[in-house]
Image (tube, rainbow, N blue to C red):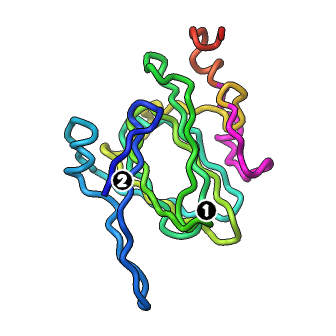
Amino acid sequence: MSVEATAIDGLFVVRWDTFGDDRGFFRQTYQVKELEEALGREVKFKQGNHSHSVPGVLRGFHAEPWDKCVYVVSGYAFAAIADIRPDSPTFGKVETFMLGEEPNGERIRLYISKGLANSFLTLGVKNVDYLYDVTDYYQAGVVQPAVAWDDPDLAVDWPLQNPILSEKDQANPTLRELIGDHPSFSS
């Protein structure tokens, strides 16, 4: 197993070996002790969530007030993670990944720290099951910042130009509208 840091502070890729035979395969998707070692802090998952989406759906960018560990069980999706934390040294950076049963066959988990904006676009012809364990309970009314999926400052090269979006995601502000003045916007 490996937990690999990315170019975004607080975003990690978790890889495990797959053991397969004619019956199928077995794979662990994470161990808390290895996540804690990579993060340098305790991890306590409190809630598990399951999102099921038809092909062509884009969810996000959402920055919830908890850490999450995401995994695509069925189908495949293009994930984009953006750092929208104004005080972060990696503010404005975006990393993209293919998750699930994607063409090269690699299955990974992403560990996404609190405040990073997570989004994913379902691809292919199969419905996508996206699981994520989180380190806090959902609480109605808690502010959860969101950013427009097509924000020009984030400049994500989405593999689909006209995704299916919720009304809420269609109304998300740009990062400039959400944050206001930031030194990175002048460069």
At 79% across and 47% down in the image, what residue appears? 161
Name the N-terminal-most of marks 1 and 2: 1
Residue 30 image position (x, y, % from top left): 31, 58
Numbered disc total: 2
Residue 130 image position (x, y, % from top left): 50, 60
Predominant secondary structure in magenta? Answer: loop
- Secondary element at tag 2: strand
At 43% across and 20% down in the image, what residue appears? 88
Residue placed most toward the observer, 9 or 62: 9
Residue placed most toward the observer, 49 or 68: 68
At 23% across and 52% down in the image, what residue appears? 32
The three-letter code of the residue at mark 2 reads Asp
At 53% across and 58% down in the image, what residue appears? 99
- Secondary element at tag 1: strand
Q: Is residue 78 above or below residue 187?
A: below
What's drawn in magenta, residue-wise? 155-174
Residue that label 2 marks: 133
Residue 156 magenta-drawn?
yes
- Report the disc number at residue 53: 1
Q: Is residue 108 above or below residue 28?
A: above
**Res. 140 image quadrant:** top left
Q: Is residue 146 above or below residue 23?
A: above
Q: Quadrant of the N terminus?
A: bottom left
